[in-house]
Image (cartoon, helix red, strand yellow):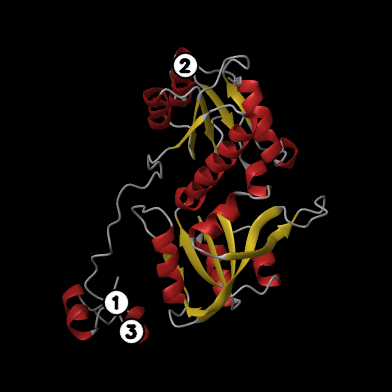
Amino acid sequence: MPTVSDVIAALDALWPPALAEPWDAVGLVCGDPEAEVTRVLFAVDPVAEVADEAIRIGADLLVTHHPLYLRGTTTVAPVGPAGFKGRVVHTLIRNGVALHVAHTNADRADPGVSDALAAAVDLRVTGPLVPDPTDPAGRRGLGRLCELDAPVSLAAFAARAAHGLPRTATGLRVAGDPETQVRTIAVCGGSGDSLFEQVRAAGADVYLTADLRHHPASEARQAGAPVLVDAAHWATEWPWCEQAAGQLDEISDRHGWALRTHVSRTVTDPWTAHAPSSSPSDLPPAASAHPSPATTPPTRASRASSSPGAPR
């Protein structure tokens, strides 16, 4: 059977640590490099529920996309404000489970996180959104540019994305006219609002990513194209787990390792519920939005009866 170090060497060939951002924390977090591996679990987040799942299925190695300790720490104590991270470390070590992280190196790899996102939504990848200048083949880099065989409406594309991605409490948010026709799609798994300049330069009709903040999204829409589809961070990165497990399966077969790989179905998106707005009406018309001191603002009831409400 392969050891932890054997499997990690194979994973590092898929997602070279040198591709990771300088601020990132990738690689082996805990575990004996010489311990044998028979079962591997892939997940997005190294949280307690996932650690418990790894133990329950008998995994020897847990591979996650997100780091456990992204910033420096001086302790793995299971107490204090960050004690939950220490408890994960103690739980894994006590049960003989190693933890390995592939983060921004997996984002930039070929195939990488955004390839898996594109595949989940059944998109044809044409190249990286932000090419890696060190890749002579021009396939590595952040994000991916994709193309549909024929244009579809933004509403239809959003429905397609919602169908392809795992369900989360918040679903997907859309910015733009639902009838806008889109064909060229930029995708970026995880937080993508730092790449708007590259998305516009690429001429994408729509941008599918996660964690879009108000100001970057508002400015992007004021600038025109692209229209936006914003999914849950976890949902845009979970497809990578299945892609990564398949890659390790192929390596295992070539080496005759007989590894068993598993993909966590535990939803670790932090948002657990969605409450639609219960306001009975839109805001009042512009003329009465800022009444003079002598004018009485309309009551909520009068607004509801005189101004039709928009769907929420």
Secondary structure beneath label 3: loop
Residue 208, image x and y in percent?
A: 53, 63
Position above or below: 111 against 29: below
- Mark 2 crowd level (few <14, some 14–19, many ≥20, 10 Å Cα): some
In this rendering, the label closer to the viewer, 2 or 3: 2
Residue 264 seen anywhere in this rendered image of the structure:
yes
Secondary structure beneath label 1: loop
Badge 2 amino acid: His
Badge 1 amino acid: Asp
Secondary structure beneath label 2: helix
Give the residue number, with chain letter if any, for mark 1: 282
Give the residue number, with chain letter if any, for mark 2: 90
- Whole-angstrom CA distance, mark 1 to mark 2, is 52 Å
Residue 76, image x and y in percent?
A: 52, 18
- Mark 1 crowd level (few <14, some 14–19, many ≥20, 10 Å Cα): some
Front-most of 298 and 150? 150
Position above or below: 107 against 8: below
- Mark 3 crowd level (few <14, some 14–19, many ≥20, 10 Å Cα): few
- Compared across the picture, whether 128 is left or right of 43 comes to right
Front-most of 248 and 220? 248
Residue 291 seen anywhere in this rendered image of the structure:
no
Give the residue number, with chain letter if any, for mark 3: 285
Residue 163, quarter of picture = bottom left
- Compared across the picture, whether 254 is left or right of 61 comes to right
In this rendering, the label closer to the viewer, 1 or 2: 2
Residue 93, image x and y in percent?
A: 49, 15
Q: Residue at x 53, y 28 (%)?
A: 259
- Whole-angstrom CA distance, mark 2 to mark 3, is 59 Å
